[in-house]
Image (tube, rainbow, N blue to C red):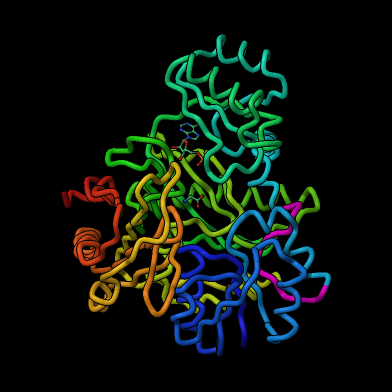
């Protein structure tokens, strides 16, 4: 079987790495992919953008691709699955309509409110004066969210009124996220610990993956501006078996059922970004795809072949599947370029990946790299995801950080406290 993955980041490298382990798979292609994917024994990158549907269809026909797996949200919201289905290409991911769960926060919030799915209280505004009055009445802390896609940067947790007002002005008046900011969701601040639960869905059935925890702010102790994610680990001890059960019964299944009742079959990965408050889970966001970097920390733990699961979601037969995991913990640490998440430089020589990967429990996923004459250079804000696993979280974390020490590029920075919350919960600090 030939599988094509759409995307070019660390998540897509991890997906290709896992897909390539399937005995059914002869070749895993990526558009546009990255040098890490190209270096996989079964890997091959093809040129093109993730929304370049015409070119993607040409590749699919020429290479006789059997299955497509979509990584990022942009092509999903733009209807890549609908488009490929028109050509009869089996594609893993939700339709444009189902992708509204991520692409419109007001749509997701309205669905949750209607079906009593636990989430922060909220209101939606399309004029700034009413939005400002709401902030004045409700006070701070309060959370301001651009309604549409904003590359993970559309959320401001405002701890004083001035920050709330300037966030509203940036989003609604200055339109820093374009049309994504024509509406805003203003939300109650939830005080707890975050976790991510990703689940396969075939439109009716839900199969959750192992829990994980991301680290959004750029600096240690959750300081500094938000990023796409600076590291992750799995499992996340904040998600106890009871909480996991509750997430499944009160959040994931009701969401998929509510979508189906609206005539929208959600087939793909439903990602619930959660705040766990006193052991109770609340949704802070839905995404309609694998998390990045959560996927890099989950897939090395997964014993099951992932390819039959993609087919089961497409065919509507997910109820016949279960997931098996290795009893290990996994940690991924993001190595970022100087300046990220602001503007950053590219083209710095990367060394030490081979040395890091001499440890058989280490894989370095490429997130933003380029290759020239056999040498690797930085080519993005998040450059590498150094991933390691071991019998417990402490060992996995230590192993990941020793691998990080072997890698170098000018301006490289990373968080030194990935997995710390989990280690504290387990009494392993
Ligand atoms: P998002 O882009 O939706 O993941 O939001 C970015 C970050 O804002 C999240 O990772 C949380 O840390 C924070 N956040 C979002 N919504 C809330 C909320 N209602 N209460 C507290 N923090 C929030
Ligand atoms: N890790 C956050 C995201 O994938 O959106």
Q: Which residues are magenta?
A: 87-98
> From the image, which quarter does the N terminus lie in?
bottom right
Depth check: give the residue in front, 76 or 234.
76
Residue pictured at 46% horizontal, 50% vertical? 196
Residue pictured at 50% horizontal, 22% vertical? 142
Give the percent coordinates (x, y) of residue 335.
Answer: 33, 56
Give the answer, above or below, for where 31 lies relative to 275. below
User: Position of 269 compared to 292: left or right?
Assistant: right
The tally of labels here is 0
Residue 211 in view of the camera:
no
Give the answer, above or below, for where 251 lies relative to 187. below
**To which quarter of the image does residue 366 belong?**
bottom left
Question: Chief secondary structure of the magenta span?
Answer: loop
Depth check: give the residue in front, 108 or 41.
41
Residue 82 in view of the camera:
yes
Residue pictured at 43% horizontal, 68% vertical? 299
Depth check: give the residue in front, 21 or 127.
127
User: Position of 297 compared to 247: left or right?
Assistant: left
Residue pictured at 72% horizontal, 75% vertical? 90
Q: Is residue 54 magenta?
A: no
Give the percent coordinates (x, y) of residue 57.
Answer: 75, 74
Which residue of the protein is positioned furthest toward the right in this rendering?
86
Q: Is residue 90 magenta?
A: yes
Give the answer, above or below, for where 110 lies relative to 412. above
Give the percent coordinates (x, y) of residue 209.
Answer: 48, 62
Give the percent coordinates (x, y) of residue 419.
Answer: 28, 51
């Amino acid at each position: 079987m030939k599988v094509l993955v759409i995307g070019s980041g660390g998540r897509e490298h991890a997906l290709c790495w896992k897909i390539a382990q399937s005995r059914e798979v002869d070749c895993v292609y990526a558009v546009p992919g990255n040098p890490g994917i190209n270096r996989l024994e079964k890997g091959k990158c093809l040129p093109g953008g993730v929304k370049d549907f015409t070119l993607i269809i040409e590749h699919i026909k020429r290479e006789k691709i059997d299955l497509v797996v979509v990584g990022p949200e942009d092509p999903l919201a733009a209807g890549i699955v609908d488009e490929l289905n028109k050509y009869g290409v089996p594609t893993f991911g939700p339709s444009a309509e189902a992708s509204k769960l991520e692409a419109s926060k007001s749509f997701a919030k309205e669905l949750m409110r209607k079906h009593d799915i636990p989430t922060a209280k909220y209101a939606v505004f399309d004029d700034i004066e009413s939005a400002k009055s709401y902030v004045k009445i409700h006070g701070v802390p309060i959370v301001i969210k651009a309604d549409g896609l904003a590359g993970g940067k559309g959320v401001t947790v405002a701890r004083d009124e001035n920050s709330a007002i300037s966030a509203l002005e940036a989003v609604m008046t200055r339109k820093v996220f374009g049309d994504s900011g024509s509406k805003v969701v203003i939300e109650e601040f939830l005080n707890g610990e975050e976790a991510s639960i990703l689940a396969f869905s075939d439109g009716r059935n839900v199969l959750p993956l192992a829990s994980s925890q991301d680290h959004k702010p750029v600096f240690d102790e959750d300081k500094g501006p938000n990023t796409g994610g600076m590291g992750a680990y799995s499992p996340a001890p904040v998600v106890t078996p009871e909480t996991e059960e509750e997430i499944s019964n009160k959040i994931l299944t009701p969401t998929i059922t509510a979508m189906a009742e609206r005539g929208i079959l959600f087939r793909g990965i439903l990602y619930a970004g959660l705040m766990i408050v006193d052991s109770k889970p609340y949704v802070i966001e839905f995404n309609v795809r694998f998390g990045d970097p959560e996927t890099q920390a989950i897939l090395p733990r997964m014993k099951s072949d992932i390819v039959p699961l993609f087919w089961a979601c497409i065919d509507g037969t997910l109820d016949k599947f279960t997931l098996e995991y290795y009893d290990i913990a996994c940690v991924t640490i993001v190595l970022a370029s100087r300046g990220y998440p602001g503007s950053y430089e590219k083209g710095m020589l990367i060394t030490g990946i081979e040395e890091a990967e001499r440890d058989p429990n280490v894989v370095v996923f490429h997130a933003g790299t380029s290759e020239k004459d056999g040498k690797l250079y930085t080519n993005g804000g998040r450059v590498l995801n150094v991933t390691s696993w071991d019998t417990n979280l402490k060992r996995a974390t230590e192993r990941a950080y020793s691998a990080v020490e072997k890698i170098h590029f000018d301006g490289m920075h990373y968080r030194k406290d990935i997995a710390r919350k989990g280690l504290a919960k387990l009494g392993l600090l």
